[in-house]
């Protein structure tokens, strides 16, 4: 199972690099989303894949019974997903605004900032 | 005040101020958010000075958030380096907040500029005070989202374009950081930096540790704009309002440098020859490309942006040499650079207000019209270049002495030559903007008159920062002592580790 996850993270990362190298900013964003998911899978796998119960302690007991799965990486991923969702939404709206105001999402033709503040 | 409050307030104050500034802005009064902003940063300065004095007196301070003992909870911790960075953040934050009163237009203020500014400061302060890697990631995100908004707020076309570049590259860096965190957790089972210092010594996988170290190096390398990962910086720092440029220039890349210093003294010290060897090469290349890039530019803010890159090289050099004297130099350089660089952007902004442009071939005559501004420009400019007796001279002197001490002749030579080229760049701004007559005649200088209030708001922070530069230059000993203590703590972090892992205070 670990191998499958590792391969999946690798494939996602490779696909995201391919997308991010594109001149279209929209494809760049999709690449970024994939890369974020690859990172989440890495964190998930690094918490070890064990077949355990949820990390809950029964009422009255001091410790959980039997094997429990590691809850921390899941908490980390949850945080990371929320944050990357926010950032992705921001980046998407930025690209949308660029498309509306500048009329392009092709990174080669975006050269306004290269000029100067002569306006 | 107890240590817990002193660690908590520098983060809580700007967040509270941000909420207040936003509400005050909604209520409709134009001036209220500005004053909230100035008041909050002034309070932050006060609290952070108290924190620094507590750390100086009693050694590193730590609190465990929510009472969860380290390494399970989130720790806030301040050693000398962290406390000094918080002080300097608050101080430059205060200076730029005053400047923003006259620089930020009503439209931007209405959209919540002042609230976002305070959130940015909260993110930066949090990054300096946290003792946990994942929490550091969260503070980076707080800082990033605020900086994204500040960069594009107002929506000029150039701002959108520059903003896209900045956003794209920084998001990639963030994901790299996250991936490195995941791998490090998989290897050690902890993300508390003090605990990592202890645990990593017991991990028997040198190859994997070095791989993770280099992944962190890549992530923070993009953040701190080192060679060859700097290209987003000069593509974006010249587009927003001057106040935004100034605070970005002062703080954002330095958070990256701080993270590098923290990780490569506390956590990744297993293979110093390899990792710090890479850092040394990067430092040299960063200095050279930055200063050459600046020489090719003809716009004030672009020149200054490239100089940020070149100066980052000096700080990384201090870390890479990894001796007490070199780290002393790196810490001293950080402090000196934040003050000087913010000030140069502010002076550039005033010059633009008076002459009408940032383009060197379209401005001039400033010396004749405003000799006092010329003096205020010369202080940070000469300090940046390392002319005695200003703060930059001591910073460069210590670093070059440190490199000669370990017989690193090449990097010492590079540092000296880059200092010389910096003089060239600064004299270019001096000759073009101040010395030569304005291309449109003398009458074009000061065509747009500033009101008295605007003049005070624009010039007061410049005078404040310039006088700090002069004070550090004339009386460097206390600052050198501070940096020396910090270097000592960085190289022997036992006290830091003990205070974090020692259980509840």
Image (cartoon, coloured by chain):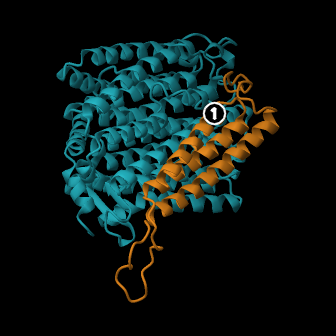
The relative height of residue B449 versus residue B33 in the rendered view (above or below) is above
Mark 1, other Cα within 10 Å: few <14 / some 14–19 / many ≥20: few
Q: Is residue A98 left or right of residue B454?
A: right
The relative height of residue B422 versus residue A16 in the rendered view (above or below) is above
Q: Which residue is mark 1?
A: A18
Looking at this rendering, what residue extends furthest in the bottom direction? A60
Q: Position of residue A65 (x, y in %)?
A: 38, 79
Q: Nearer the viewer, residue B268 or A43?
A: A43
Q: Position of residue B31 (x, y in %)?
A: 64, 53
Q: Is residue B150 left or right of residue A46?
A: right
| Residue B109 seen in render | no
The residue at the point 45 percent across, 77 percent down is A56
Q: Position of residue B70 (x, y in %)?
A: 31, 64
Q: Nearer the viewer, residue B112 or A82?
A: A82
Q: Position of residue B369 (x, y in %)?
A: 58, 20
Q: Is residue A21 left or right of residue B324?
A: right
The residue at the point 49 percent across, 59 percent down is A76
> Total marks drawn?
1
| Residue B431 seen in render | yes
Q: Is residue B83 left or right of residue B408?
A: right
Q: Quadrant of the N terminus of chain B?
A: bottom left
Q: Quadrant of residue B244?
A: top right
Disc 1, SS = helix
Give the chain coloured cyan. B
The residue at the point 42 percent across, 58 percent down is A48
Mark 1 belongs to chain: A
Q: Quadrant of the C terminus of chain B?
A: bottom left
The relative height of residue B66 versus residue B213 in the rendered view (above or below) is below
Q: Quadrant of residue B370?
A: top right
Q: Nearer the viewer, residue B78 or A118?
A: B78
Give the chain coloured orange. A
The residue at the point 70 percent across, 52 percent down is B110
């Amino acid at each position: 199972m670990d191998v499958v996850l590792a391969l999946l993270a690798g494939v996602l990362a490779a696909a995201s690099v391919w997308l991010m190298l594109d001149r279209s900013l929209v494809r760049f964003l999709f690449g970024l989303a994939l890369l974020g998911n690859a990172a989440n899978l890495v964190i998930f796998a690094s918490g070890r894949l064990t077949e355990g119960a949820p990390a809950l302690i029964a009422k009255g007991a001091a410790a959980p019974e039997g094997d429990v799965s590691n809850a921390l990486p899941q908490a980390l991923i949850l945080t990371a997903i929320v944050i990357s969702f926010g950032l992705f939404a921001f980046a998407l709206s930025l690209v949308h605004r660029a498309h509306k105001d500048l009329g392009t999402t092709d990174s080669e033709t975006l050269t306004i900032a290269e000029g100067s503040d002569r306006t | 005040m107890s240590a817990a409050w002193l660690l908590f307030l520098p983060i809580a104050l700007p967040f509270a101020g941000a909420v207040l500034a936003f509400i005050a802005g909604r209520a409709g009064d134009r001036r209220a958010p500005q004053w909230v902003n100035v008041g909050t940063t002034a309070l932050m300065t006060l609290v952070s000075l108290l924190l620094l004095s507590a750390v100086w007196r009693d050694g590193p301070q730590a609190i465990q958030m929510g009472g969860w003992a380290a390494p399970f909870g989130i720790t806030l911790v301040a050693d000398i380096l962290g406390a000094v960075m918080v002080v300097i953040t608050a101080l430059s934050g205060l200076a730029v907040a005053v400047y923003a009163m006259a620089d930020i237009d009503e439209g931007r203020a209405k959209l919540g500029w002042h609230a976002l500014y305070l959130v940015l400061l909260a993110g930066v302060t949090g990054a300096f005070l946290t003792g946990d890697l994942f929490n550091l990631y969260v503070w980076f995100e707080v800082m990033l989202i605020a900086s994204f908004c500040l960069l594009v707020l107002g929506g000029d076309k150039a701002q959108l374009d520059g903003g896209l570049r900045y956003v794209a590259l920084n998001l990639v860096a963030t994901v790299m950081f996250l991936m490195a965190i995941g791998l490090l957790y998989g290897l050690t089972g902890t993300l508390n930096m003090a605990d990592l210092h202890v645990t990593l010594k017991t991990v028997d996988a040198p190859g994997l540790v070095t791989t993770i170290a280099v992944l962190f190096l890549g992530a923070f390398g993009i953040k701190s704009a080192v060679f060859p990962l700097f290209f987003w910086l000069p593509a974006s720092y010249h587009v927003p309002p001057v106040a935004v440029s100034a605070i970005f220039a002062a703080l954002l890349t330095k958070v990256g440098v701080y993270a590098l210093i923290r990780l490569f003294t506390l956590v990744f010290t297993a293979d110093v020859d390899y990792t710090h060897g890479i850092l040394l090469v990067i430092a040299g290349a960063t200095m050279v490309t930055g200063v050459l890039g600046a020489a090719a530019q003809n716009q004030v803010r672009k020149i200054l942006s490239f100089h940020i890159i070149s100066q980052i090289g000096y700080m990384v050099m201090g870390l890479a040499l990894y001796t007490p004297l070199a780290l002393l130099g790196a810490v001293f350089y950080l402090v000196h650079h934040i003050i000087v660089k913010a000030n140069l952007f502010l002076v550039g902004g005033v010059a633009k207000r008076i002459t009408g442009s940032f383009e060197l071939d379209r401005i001039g005559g400033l010396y004749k019209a405003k000799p006092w501004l010329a003096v205020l420009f010369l202080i940070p400019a000469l300090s940046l270049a390392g002319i005695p007796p200003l703060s930059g001279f001591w910073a460069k002197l210590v670093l070059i002495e440190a490199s000669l001490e370990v017989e690193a002749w090449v990097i010492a030579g590079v540092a000296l030559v880059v200092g010389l080229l910096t003089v060239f760049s600064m004299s270019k701004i001096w000759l073009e903007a101040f010395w030569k007559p304005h291309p449109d005649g003398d009458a074009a200088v000061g065509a747009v008159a500033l009101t008295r209030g605007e003049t005070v708001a624009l010039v007061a922070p410049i005078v404040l920062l310039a006088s700090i530069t002069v004070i550090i230059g004339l009386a460097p000993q206390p600052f050198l002592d501070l940096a020396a203590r910090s270097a000592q703590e960085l190289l022997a972090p036992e006290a830091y580790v003990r205070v974090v892992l020692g259980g509840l205070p």
